[in-house]
Amino acid sequence: MIIDGKAVADGIRAELLARTARFFQIAGRKPALAVVLIGNDPASEIYVRNKLRACAEAGIRSVDVRMPAEVSTQEATEAVRRLAADGEIDGILVQLPLPKHLDPRVILAEIPAEKDVDGFSEENIGALALGREGTVACTPLGVMELLKRYRIPTSGKHAVVVGRSNIVGKPMALLLLNADATVTVCHSHTRGLKEICLQADILVAAAGKPKLITADMVKEGAVVIDVGTNREGGKLCGDVDFGEVEKKASYITPVPGGVGPMTVAMLLSNVCAAAEKRIR
Ligand code: NDP
């Protein structure tokens, strides 16, 4: 079965519209997200535009903060600090990657955990590692939501995550572990990737390498989640050789239309949750 991430994301976004309307009734204002974009990286411009549009459609006020590429770490830090102190802002997102001369750690550290809707802060990652409540990174959270909505069990399953980045692979592995899966994490130094992948009941590919996962690496009936978003000859593709792997998998996400749409939906959901917590 092909997992339709777009349909699930559309459903979540419709649910959010009702949630933001309720918030408005109680708080007298919309939940608000500040999006900070530094420089003019074309891909980042597109991502930010999509996020701002998605906010508007979900009844979330967005504040578009643009800064030139030459801005200093201090100026960027001060801008984020102002948003952190602003009582009418519920979430802050700094679009990555930042221009080379800026240190993302210093700038992101200014976002308080309760406004960290990307779930990248040390406090939120720590909470996830400890199995406590916190904000979880949108992409891995979106994968868990897909598993949940398709009623795919995780308890006792062997989940293999290919990729160990701080924004996808690691939080993905922690979420699956917290959901009682037995988790193996692979990376570029892993030996015997094929043999490990063949053991997976749930295989999550998040390496950013087109066609890394081929059919001979997938167990019959496995659930295959493709997080990869790569461009090949101008076309979007994942990390999984979809055409061949589809024949073996019980469930599989396509690219595009799988995990991608879920990321934005979960961001909106994290903004709503952050806003609701602040008025509780
Ligand atoms: P990173 O480049 O930060 O991390 C890639 C990870 O994959 C690293 O841990 C790396 O290992 C590992 N890796 C690379 N090559 C191999 C290999 N041949 N075998 C095994 N492991 C390998 O990428 P991100 O985590 O940020 O993103 C991963 C993919 O997901 C990208 O395609 C990205 O575009 C996509 N993405 C999609 C999103 C969405 O909304 N759908 C959101 C975020 C990302 P090592 O640590 O050893 O270098």
Image (spheres, grey):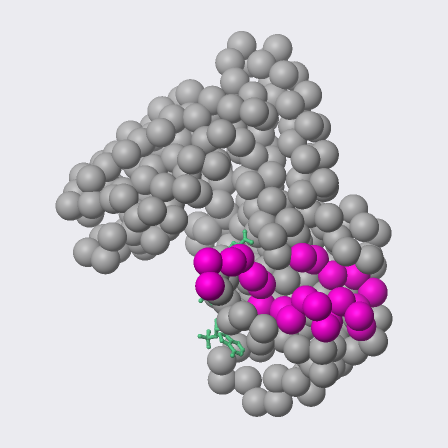
Q: Residue at x 56, y 61 (%)?
A: 237
Give coordinates of residue 189: x percent, y percent. 49, 84
- 107 lies above or below 35: below
Q: Is 61 left, or right, of 39 in this rendering?
A: right
Image quadrant assignment for residue 92: top left
At a point 63% along the width and 16% down the height, the residue shown is: 21
Quarter containing the N terminus = bottom right
Count up the numbered dots: 0
Residue closest to the eye, 2 or 52:
2
Question: Is residue 267 depicted above or below 254 in this figure?
Answer: above
Q: In the rendered image of this protein, does residue 273 appear above or below residue 43?
A: above
Residue at the outermost front position: 233
Residue 165 picture location, percent across and down: 48, 65
95 up-or-down from 240: above or below? above
Going 54% across and 70% down the picture, which residue do you hit? Answer: 210
**Can you say which quadrant of the picture contains the C terminus?**
top right
- Left of 154 or right of it: where is 129? left
**Residue name at image x 51 percent, y 13 percent:** 29
Q: Is residue 263 magenta?
A: no
Residue 244 falls within the magenta-colored stretch? yes
Residue 103 in percent (x, y) is at 26, 55
**In the image, which residues are magenta?**
233-254
Q: Is residue 185 visible?
A: no
Q: Position of residue 226 (x, y in %)?
A: 63, 62
82 relative position to 125: left or right: left
Query: Residue 34: in sight, yes or no?
Result: yes
Most foreground residue, 182 or 144: 144
- Give the image quarter of residue 134: top right
Q: Residue furthest bottom?
A: 192
